Image: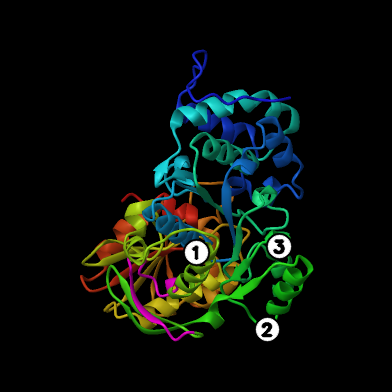
Amino acid sequence: MHICISAHPHYLCTMTYQQTLEDLYARLPVFSQIGSAAYKEDLHNTIALCNAIGNPQNNFKSIHIAGTNGKGSTSHMLAAILQQAGYRTGLYTSPHLKDFGERIKVNGEMISQDFVIEFAQQTKPLCDEIQPSFFELTVAMAFSYFEKEKIDIAIIETGLGGRLDSTNIITPILSVITNIGYDHMNILGNTLEAIATEKAGIIKPGIPVVIGEYMDETKPVFINKAAKENASIYFAQDIYSISNIKSEQYKLTLDVENNSDKNKESFTLDLNGLYQVKNLRTVLCAESILYELGFKISNEAEKFALANVKKLTGLRGRWDIISEHPTVVLDVAHNEDGIKQIINQITKSNIQHSKLHFVIGFVKDKDVDKALQLLPKDGYYYFTNAHIPRALPNKDLQAKANAIGLKGDVFDNVNRAIDTAKSHAAKDDLIIVCGSVFLVGEVNY
């Protein structure tokens, strides 16, 4: 079966964009809704879908990005730099916060709604036959769209893991693994080595790989896999040293020194979370390899892009200040490492605050107990949940929190919780909304 995806909406198609998405959600297993039941442990469906549409992934260059945390920010930073340097840049990430179109972008613009409708309609017979997951279909959709849009380069973020991730049918020009932490252990394994092995599955024969951060347990996994694939490996944390970090309300400034040639540069980022320091190292290391591969990126384009990632790519939800007096921050931190980074931000950044308020909600398949243990006992808590089947009910979250001394009330939706937090907070208090990407996605801003 070969499917041709036309560039124009089909005159017989009667579904709207919203109806098309609702139909896809209803027909296909969606990980964000039901969790691991939607995860397919092989690449057969993605291969079948891409074969049917002419294997578009073979017709553009790509960079493949995996990791436990930071892969979204890293993907958006790299996309911003390439876009600003004049390259027509595709960006595939997941999940989305507000609109499905956030997952598939070209030069910061969301995928055409007509293309989504047309692609869903024309692949429906094959989908009915092979029953792909929602993620598998959207990966094929992204590849098809990027081919149609004649992009120069695509940044492709894995959904989960790496080795068996639907995106892992590409042969990129560069692979990137941001870091390894405990997440999705029910699928990826219970040790850091096991998780690293799954993520290292994106390392391809002869293709250079950047490792953002490593630990004693994970470094040998990466070295061994790279050696087996004859792939050059670069450890960003060894290549660059960071100093003079200043986290301000809406920006992060820092100096980066290349440890080999001692060249030092100053950067300003509009992604102002302290954890972006690690992601910047990864991005700069990736950028230096792109330069060697023939990409022309001026210093001016790089600096402008990093200071304007949100504007260029539309990234939201990373230490994202949405209002002041009191300060309300959205952050998609949703696992142990992510919550650690939030606590680090509160203690080390110079955001002045009197009291802390946490509007918080998790999904059921995270290690919620470990994440809760990291939160301060003297904070005020507002327990809520996203409106998806995977969400941990707010009362269950409250019970877990109460058991370790975190007190607060339950709320049936995140916006009511934020409104209540604002009414309880003084002007110089800090309200943090975190725990789930899907929770942040339901915030009105």
From what the image shows, is residue 164 above or below residue 24? below
Q: Which residue position holds label 1?
A: 291
The foreground one among 55 and 45 is: 55
User: Is residue 186 visible in the rendered structure shown here?
Assistant: no
Element assignment for label 2: loop
Identify whether 89 is placed above or below 193: above
- The image quadrant of residue 423 is bottom left
Task: Based on the picture, tell me whether residue 3 belongs to the magenta stretch.
Answer: no
* Residue 225: image location, x then y, percent: 75, 69
> Quarter-wise, where is residue 348 in the image?
bottom left
Residue 216 disc label: 2
Q: CA distance from mark 3 to mark 2?
A: 25 Å
Marking on residue 123: none
Of mark 3 and mark 2, the one earlier in the sequence is 3
Residue at 51% x, 85% y is 260
Q: CA distance from mark 3 to mark 1?
A: 17 Å
Q: Find residue 339 and report its horizontal and vertical position in percent.
A: 49, 72
Tell me the number on the disc at residue 206: 3
Residue 444 falls left or right of residue 51:
left
Q: Secondary structure at mark 1?
A: helix
The residue depicted at 48 percent of the width and 41 percent of the height is: 100
